[in-house]
Image (cartoon, helix red, strand yellow):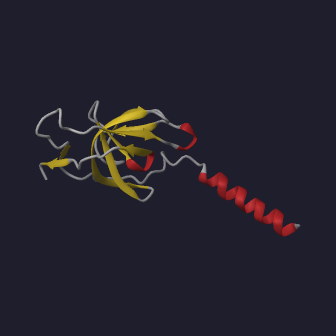
Amino acid sequence: MNRRMMRSGVIATVAALAMVPTLAFAHSCPHPAPGRHVAHQGASPTTATRAHGRVTTPNGFALNVRSGPGTGYRVVGTARDGSVQSLRCRTNGSSVRGNERWYRLSHHRGYVSAHYVHVFGALPWCRVLGS
């Protein structure tokens, strides 16, 4: 009986720790990658594919939208948990929970960590200017 109670306690503790919000504890990048990140320009707007992604954050917290692809960039807005965002392109940036992929939002100049977004559709790579 004691073993079962101990195992249940350990499982409950691990489950509780998994629910701790990780948005505030994401790895900070003190020196973001140089250059300005822009989306690829297609041959015409009608041939460009649009991808969408659903924001999935722990405990329903809002996801920070940043000015560049990394946690060292300033926060320029938020995206609600469960919301569907239109995405322009993907790029690499600072690591968030082991994931270095970031997505640029279509509607304004902002990036979100791929760790918290489930993508639907094909997404091109972003082009980096000035590097």
Tell me which residue sits at (76%, 65%) in the image: 7
* Residue at the far front in the pictured view: 47
* Residue at the far bottom in the pictured view: 3
In which image quadrant can residue 38 be found? top left
Residue 30 vs residue 22: left or right? left
Between 4 and 21, the one lying in front of the other is: 4
Where is residue 23 shown, x and y percent of the image?
48, 45
Tell me which residue sits at (41%, 38%) in the image: 64
Residue 36 vs residue 98: left or right? left
Where is residue 39 shown, x and y percent of the image?
20, 42
Between 122 and 35, the one lying in front of the other is: 122
In which image quadrant can residue 37 be found? top left
Between 125 and 8, the one lying in front of the other is: 125
Tell me which residue sits at (43%, 50%) in the image: 115
Where does the N terminus fall, quadrant-wise? Answer: bottom right
Height in image: 31 above or below 45? below
Where is residue 68 shown, x and y percent of the image?
28, 43
Query: How many numbered circles does the render carry?
Result: 0
* Residue at the far right in the pictured view: 1
Residue 131 vs residue 51: left or right? left
